[in-house]
Amino acid sequence: MSIPFAYNLRNLVVRKTTTIMTALGIGLTVAVLLAILALVNGLHSTLSVSGDPRHVLVLRKGSDTELVSVFTRTQFQDLKFKPGIATGRDGQPLASMEVVTIMILESPGAESANFTVRGLDPAGIEMRRNVHLAGGRWFQRGQREVVVGKSVADRFPSAQIGKKVHFGRGDWTVVGVFDASGGAQASEVWGDVFQVSSDLQRVDYVSSCLVDAADAVSAQALVTSLNDDQRLEVKAMLEKDYYDEQTGSAKPIEYTGLIVAIIMAVGSCFAAMNTMYAAVARRAREIGTLRVLGFSKGSILTSFLAESAALSALGGLAGCLLALPLNGVSTAIGNRTYSETTFAFHVTPSIMLTGILFAVVLGSVGGFFPARMAARKQILTALREG
Amino acid sequence: MFRYLPLVLKNCWRNKRRTVLTVISIGISMCLLGVMIAMFHAFYLSDPAPAQALRLVTRNRVSFTVFIPRGYQVKMEHVPGVRLVTVANYFGGIYKDDRDPKNQFARFGVEPEKLFRVFGEFRIPDNQRLTFEHDRTGCVVGRDLADLFHFQVGDRIHLTGNIFPGNYEFTIRGIFDSPRSSQLMYFNEEYVEQMQSEGFRGNVIMYYTLIDDPAHSARVARDIDALFANSTAQTKTETSQAFAVAFLAQLGNVKMFLIGISAAVMFTILLVSANTMAMSVRERVREVGILKTLGFTPASILGMILGEACAISIAGGVIGYLISTLLMQGVAKSPFGPYLSVHAFDSPVAIACVLTAAAIGVMSSLIPAMGASRTSIVEALRSTD
């Protein structure tokens, strides 16, 4: 027969100071783990909505980021009429020649940050269906005008409609703000491809090309046919894969965070062990009495293990509560091109469940030795103790 | 005060298991804190090694992923205080399977005849240095890199460029030793330059500048940046240590990360220690009553309990610090090692760890200690638990 769980719960309540302190210690460990998981998850969800499965990104052979890629106008003309590319509203193929560079934004009182500047064709705006104008208007061809992503506008008061930002050879007027439905494009600044590339003095050599295929299947076919084209010498990939790969930029933080959480967990494990040993020592007589009443060694062991697990589950819950305010807090991380991608921490139920499970495992490991000691007590000595 | 030290130590040891568990728990958390403090110290507080303090890094102000013109070199050489300027092109590139982090060691295109003057602390046999200077496709590798891949002089290394496109084959002409981690490869930037198509020549990623006196570094850096303040490619010049920190900062907000985790760890230690002290004081209420009847003043009882907590957390702090030095040696061997000034024993870091531990000891036991010192004798003696 097993000892009722209520017995353990009541014990936790009676010794509330110790319970709260141990649980909070475990809670902090869990909170660190959750913060890291929420960060990685947030970045992942931002990047996963950034890439459209129908889009194919074309770079120079050997390049792996848009920033270091070089793509010539001649290549673009050859590529534009490849079969499988969807047609836009104006009847032209949906292919956008794009040039990518980095700008630095400064504002008094805030740390400066780098953002990706993208010069693109109108087709590029049309094919990015997740991007919508949130205020102002789009830039005009041939004008030194830019439209900034929402994350950029939110972070920098200097990047508002009507103001001027500086990059390349001079000032550019901000004429609009766009929203990217949670995508990474919201951390970019967009302008006319001809203006931006001539400002960079690379009119004939832009960075990359983005094409829109009729559907996901023909996108895949397009990737294969472009990569096989000996004459073009380009590297094509699904835009989705390009963004998925960029989750790698969170790897250093992810690994460091996980190592920190694991080391903290070992520390908390010893703390839980300490608390449980104290609990066993104080209740020696109770344990003896329970044994006299006929409860087996096994049920004593499970009872104390359950108590330790309950204690740490409480810690796990505390950790969730501590980490929950992080949900939705936006942060930025350097991407592969060393400019920033803004995204929000994402504390999901499944992450919280992971945290609680982590705590329970930690507590059970810490509670095992004290529970075994409780179970092995001789009835007579136990009754005499305390 | 120290009269009671034997009694304090004896009290620590009365419940051996609890003390050991607490010390281990604090020690493990403190080792994390030690690593965080050491990193913070290395990034933001420590003085660079003398050789590093003489080196400035100049890059595009926007980002080091944006090129600066080759023509800057001549102008920079004329700034007072500058001894030598060399091109240092971070090459990136792909060696074998790029997914294996081992293969992503740092490689730079430099001017061979200047490399060992700018990096005065590198040691290489003269004959190897000379063959490297005379072979356009030659390269030199650091001892650590050579050990990692079992490279020998005469071996060939094949790289595919991504920032500088092309297929390159380098012959190892020398292996150099460095006081820091040396997973590094240097080769002749001219070889790479000539492989570029005409429109893409004349681009430089960074310049290393050797200056005459560390005291001039701030002025020289300012003078160099002032030269190009009105050009399209503005520069940012900083010491190589500041550059390493800026590089790391690209990965995320490093300072916040370090401070956030340190705070969480410290609070955890505080809870663990407070819990132990609360337990141990609770067991001893009666004993405190007896001590008081014997004539111990409330102040001395307060001191004894605080002392006990300090002793336990300092023990944890020392163990934690020792583990953290081992971990930091691992960090020094990591790919970031070449850019950090991490020492085996940093006295400011050690002192910071022990002081933090002591402070945590005092804070964690203040409440139970005050309680015990204030209880009246009668009440304390009546307690049965």
Image (cartoon, rainbow, N blue to C red):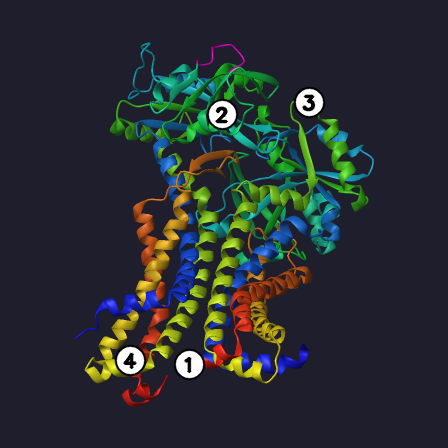
Task: Examine the rendered structure and indicate whether residue A373 appears above or below residue A169.
Answer: below
Q: Residue at x 60, y 61 (%)?
A: B356
Give coordinates of residue B39: x percent, y percent. 59, 54
Q: Earlier in the sequence, mark 1 or mark 3?
A: 3
Secondary structure at numbered mark 4? helix
Q: Nearer the viewer, mark 1 or mark 3?
A: 1
Q: Amino acid at mark 2?
A: Ala
Q: Nearer the viewer, mark 4 or mark 3?
A: 4
Q: Which residue is mark 3?
A: B231
Q: Nearer the viewer, mark 2 or mark 3?
A: 2
What label does residue B384 carry, if any?
1
Separation (CA) of disc 4 from disc 3? 82 Å
Q: Nearer the viewer, mark 1 or mark 2?
A: 1
Q: Which residue is mark 2?
A: A153
Chain of the residue displaying label 4: A
Within 10 Å of the Cα at label 1, are there few (<14), some (14-19), or many (20+) other Cα atoms? few
Within 10 Å of the Cα at label 2, are there few (<14), some (14-19), or many (20+) other Cα atoms? many
Chain of the residue displaying label 3: B
Q: Amino acid at mark 4?
A: Ile
Image-based side of B18 in relation to A357, left or right: right
Is B169 or B48 nearer to us in this picture?
B48
What label does residue A287 carry, if any?
4
A140 drawn magenta: yes
* Residue A146 visible from this viewpoint: yes
